[in-house]
Amino acid sequence: MYAFNYHRPATARQAAGLLSKKEDAKLLAGGHTLLPTMKQRLASPAHLVDLAGCADLKGITRKGRTIVIGAMTTHAEVAASAEVREAIPGLAWLASHIGDPHVRHRGTIGGSVANNDPAADYPAACLALGATIVTNTRKIEADAFFTGLYETALEEGEIITRIVFPLASRAAYAKFRNPASRYALVGVFVAKRGPEVRVAVTGAGEGGVFRWAEGEAALRNRFAPKSLDGLKASADGINSDMHADAEYRAHLIGVMAKEAVARATGK
Ligand SMILES: Cc1cc2nc3c(=O)[nH]c(=O)nc-3n(C[C@H](O)[C@H](O)[C@H](O)COP(=O)(O)OP(=O)(O)OC[C@H]3O[C@@H](n4cnc5c(N)ncnc54)[C@H](O)[C@@H]3O)c2cc1C
């Protein structure tokens, strides 16, 4: 590791102040992406602003028909939360299937969403549930937040403070995971709220997480696994790599969507 300056603010406001004053500063959350990147010299910030001491960025609360999760809340905390398990069990299930115990106890929801890895799980939940990503300066709808591979609508120096998930009448996630990393080869989160159905796919898209319009249309008629019978996602714009080609991933989108709907409906 090379030399850098380490800062440990006590609030998100202090963190924002440091980011604006220090040139070439980067936020550190769980460090599960940033530290390996630094070790490989793919990033070399002069200042690290560690959010671990910011108590205002932690915790889970139920507010009316929403669940609000602080950016520095770990995956393990989301998985174990009684509020999340009761209100959006599919979200708790998703968190409990991220990586391994070490990753779940260090990795944070804010870090995951800010990083927008194309195979990460939370972006699919945010998009399907219609979450709002709240930063120190504004609120961004999930539809506008994920803009490409590792790209988000976040501006320089902007800090995610919390994520607001509206409840759905039915919601669940299914993923076919890479057995080595446990990232999603393909993951599908489905959510139904009133007449609205949203199906979000991670792990597959060349541009990162996306909504599967054909799947949504089929499920709008009837929210049941059977509605997806014979429906296959197009392989256009789907990733091919050493783990799976585009055709295989496209096939998995239908399979995972069906499994997620089965979980959501208990069928
Ligand atoms: C072995 C391994 C397996 C994994 N498996 C999975 C998996 O199965 N599924 C999955 O979804 N993920 C997986 N991950 C990723 C992991 O879950 C973390 O979520 C991810 O590394 C980022 O979160 P972090 O808290 O570690 O963020 P960091 O690494 O600390 O930060 C990541 C990026 O986000 C920025 N950032 C952090 N917090 C904020 C904030 N509040 N506001 C704005 N920017 C911020 C940082 O500056 C940095 O650029 C895996 C990671 C590892 C190492």
Image: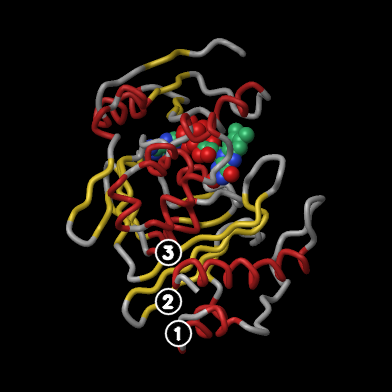
Q: Earlier in the sequence, mark 1 or mark 3?
A: 3
Up/down of 213 relative to 96, above or below? below
Label 3 neighbourhood size at 10 Å, few (<14), some (14-19), many (20+)? some
Question: Which residue extends farthest left?
Answer: 64
Gap in Å between the C-alphas at discs 2 and 1? 6 Å
Q: Earlier in the sequence, mark 3 or mark 2?
A: 3
Q: Mark 2 is on which residue type?
A: Val
Label 2 neighbourhood size at 10 Å, few (<14), some (14-19), many (20+)? many
Disc 1 is placed on an element classified as: helix
Q: Position of residue 1 (x, y in %)?
A: 62, 13
Q: Which residue is mark 2?
A: 197
Residue 157 at least partly seen: no
Up/down of 262 relative to 242, above or below? below
Contact check, label 2 and label 1, Cβ < 8 Å:
yes
Say which of 173 and 15 sits in front: 173
Q: Position of residue 133 (x, y in %)?
A: 34, 52
Q: Residue at x 45, y 13 (%)?
A: 5
Say left or right for 98 vs 6: right
Q: Which residue is mark 3?
A: 143
Disc 2 is placed on an element classified as: strand
Q: Which residue is mark 1?
A: 220
Q: Position of residue 182 (x, y in %)?
A: 64, 44
The image quadrant of residue 180 is top right
Q: Mark 3 is on which residue type?
A: Asp
Disc 3 is placed on an element classified as: helix
* In the image, the residue with mark 3 has its CB under 8 Å from the nearest atom of ligand 1: no
Nearest to viewer (mark 3 / mark 2)? 2
Q: Position of residue 146 (x, y in %)?
A: 48, 56
Say which of 240 and 83 sits in front: 83
Q: Mark 1 is on which residue type?
A: Arg
